[in-house]
Image (tube, rainbow, N blue to C red):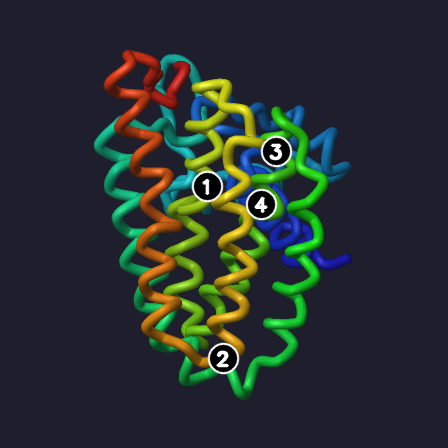
């Protein structure tokens, strides 16, 4: 395998682990551990980390090392507001593009089946399922830059970091998960108005969770170094 391919594969794997919450904010990045985990030399790992530093996924502390970027209350609120903007914009773009993307709707429908078996504290699993669903939804814009921005800011992942901090039983989110079925139905029926109204409710849940954490002094800055 060419070195460029190894670098690209290492970069994508580390980035995915961050996006999907395998490495939550505050996790220390240890180059040798990644080298062993991915079974590659340190050189592509170092190059991948430098790329992630430039893109803002990780940050460097002169005394302690490299960590997945920590998030303050302001950071999280900004990201949730960004998520609202992107998903509401996607509603309009998706209705225009839906005819050309039946495979995406099919994948979203397949993902719906996975919400049934979510266990109360299986945050990593539901985060992975949610990321796949919402990344597919945003991909309906047909705009790779928007999707990249959405992924890079971990628009879905931070929600489950919050739920994990609050030890929230995921069964309490059943109504929110049921809304995914409606999202697909409104997409298929090209009902932009209903889709937009549903998304406003759907995306407000994480913002309400953040307000609850702050009000009850349960927010811990997502940064442990």
Query: How far is disc 2 from disc 1 in space, using C-alphas?
Result: 45 Å
Which residue is painted at 59% across and 54% down in the image? 132
Q: Which residue is mark 3?
A: 124
Q: Residue furthest bottom?
A: 99
The correct choice, above or below, for 69 with respect to 129 in the image is: above
Q: Where residue 128 appears, x then y in whole percent?
A: 61, 44
Q: Nearer the viewer, residue 168 or 140?
A: 168
Specify the quadrant of the image occupied by residue 52: top left
Identify the secondary structure beneath mark 2: loop
Q: Nearer the viewer, mark 3 or mark 1?
A: 3
- State the separation of the CA atoms marked 3 and 4: 13 Å
Above-or-below relation of 80 to 172: below
For label 1, the SS is: helix
Closer to the camera in the image, 11 or 41: 11
Sequence-first disc among 3 and 2 = 3
- Residue to which mark 4 is pinned: 16
At a point 42% along the width and 36% down the height, the residue shown is 158
Instruction: For marks 4 and 2, give the CA distance.
Output: 32 Å
Mark sitting on residue 164: none
């Amino acid at each position: 395998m060419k070195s460029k391919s190894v670098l690209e594969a290492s970069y994508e794997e580390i980035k995915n682990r961050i996006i999907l919450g395998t490495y939550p904010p505050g996790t220390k990045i240890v180059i040798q551990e990644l080298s062993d985990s991915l079974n590659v030399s340190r050189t592509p790992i170092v190059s991948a980390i430098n790329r992630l530093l430039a893109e803002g996924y990780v940050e460097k502390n002169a005394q302690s090392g490299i960590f997945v970027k920590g998030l303050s209350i302001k950071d999280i609120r900004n990201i949730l507001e960004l998520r609202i903007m992107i998903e509401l914009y996607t509603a309009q773009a998706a209705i225009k593009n839906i005819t050309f993307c039946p495979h995406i709707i099919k994948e979203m429908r397949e993902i719906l089946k996975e919400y049934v078996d979510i266990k109360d504290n299986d945050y990593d699993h539901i985060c992975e399922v949610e990321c796949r669903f919402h990344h597919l939804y945003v991909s309906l814009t047909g705009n790779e830059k928007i999707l990249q921005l959405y992924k890079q800011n971990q628009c879905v992942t931070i929600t489950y970091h919050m739920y994990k901090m609050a030890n929230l039983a995921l069964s309490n989110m059943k109504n929110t998960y049921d809304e995914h079925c409606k999202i697909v139905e409104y997409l298929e029926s090209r009902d932009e108005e209903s889709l937009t109204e549903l998304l406003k409710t759907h995306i407000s849940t994480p913002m309400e969770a953040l307000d609850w954490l702050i009000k009850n002094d349960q927010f811990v800055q997502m940064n442990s170094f």
